[in-house]
Amino acid sequence: MAPKTERMTHLEFIQKAFDTLRKTDKAGNQYAGLHTVYSGFNEAFRKYFPSDDPIKVTARLKESGELNVRPCRGGAMIYMGEFTPAD
């Protein structure tokens, strides 16, 4: 019998996306945020959660303090809740 696979929550998915999609600078350090469009996050989110809108979900997680969202060119940057970038 195959083991039951459980779906990730929205927050678990975002945490995994941070681990796999974030870019690094020339020194090999990972950037603090994740661009929702250029990284492929929105596309991956829609494939995993076909009935959910990544914009609405990230906005809800922002309201709860679990995520920070900053508009930027071409989309938005998302940051985990404990990190707030300087303006």
Image (cartoon, rainbow, N blue to C red):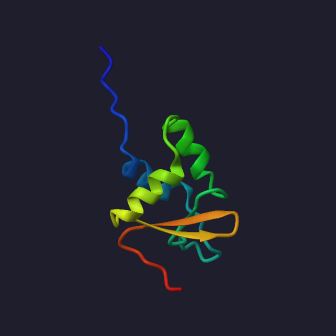
In the picture shown, does residue 21 fall above or below 48? below
At 36% from the left and 44% from the top, the residue drawn is 9
Q: Is residue 44 left or right of residue 13?
A: right
Nearer-the-camera pick, 13 or 23: 13
Looking at the image, is 13 positioned above or below residue 22? above
Spot the residue most to the bottom: 87
Residue 28, image quadrant: bottom right
In this view, the residue farthest toward the top is 1
Residue at screen point 34% across, 67% down: 65
Q: Quadrant of the N terminus?
A: top left
The relative height of residue 57 versus residue 69 in the rendered view (above or below) is above
Quadrant assignment, res 66: bottom left
Count of numbered tags:
0
- Nearest to the observer: residue 21 or residue 80: 80
Residue 5 in the image, given as x and y percentages of width and height = 34, 29
When asked about the image quadrant of residue 39, the answer is: bottom right
Q: Position of residue 32 (x, y in %)?
A: 50, 72
